[in-house]
Every structure is written in structure tokens, then in C-alpha cells.
Amino acid sequence: MDMQAIRDLAKEFGIKTSRMSKVKLIQSIQLTEGNFACFATATSGECDQLSCLWREDCFAAAKKLHS
């Protein structure tokens, strides 16, 4: 998902988006939804949240952050 779409979604939840990285912004959305703030933490490439909206981006972000 591109950053503008993520910002738009965050604003729907009342999250202020200025100066937040993609990772922090998605984690804030996850928390607001009542989920774990786990985006970009799947360093082993494994995750049991099969229906997560962020799943594909998560693995790529985790690989970038932890390589």
C-alpha cells in the first residue's frame, strides 16, 4: 500500500500522520484497531496472521530493517 493510502487510513482512525515513518504509522493503525503493533517485526519471515492487510509489505519491511 502506498504512503498516501496509509495516511488516509490513519486519518480515518484519528491518527496524526505528520513525520511518521511507514512502519510507525502502520503500527499505530494496528494498535488503534486493537491488534498487535507487529508490522515489520517478522524477521524470520513467518507470521500466523494470514488475513493481515499489511502482510506482504510487512515481510519486505522487516527484511529491510533487519538486514
Image: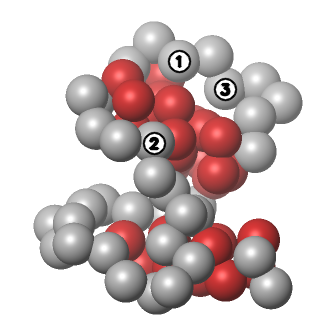
- Residues at marks 2 and 1 touching, judged by CB atoms closer than 8 Å: no
Question: Disc 3 designates what residue?
Answer: 17
Q: Residue at the location (30% across, 61% down)? A: 53
Of residue 64 and residue 57, the one placed in the foreground of this image is 64
User: Is residue 9 in view?
Assistant: no
Q: The C terminus appears in which quarter of the rendering?
A: bottom right
Residue at x 35% of width, y 41% of height: 36
Q: Secondary structure at mark 3?
A: loop
Name the foreground residue: 33 vs 44. 44
Most extreme residue toward the left is 51
Q: Would you say residue 37 is visible in this rendering?
A: yes
Rendered position, 57 above or below 53: below
The three-letter amino acid code for the residue at tag 3 is Thr
Q: Position of residue 61 (x, y in %)?
A: 64, 72
5 above or below 55? above
User: What number is the disc on residue 37?
Assistant: 2
On the image, which quarter does residue 63 sit in? bottom right
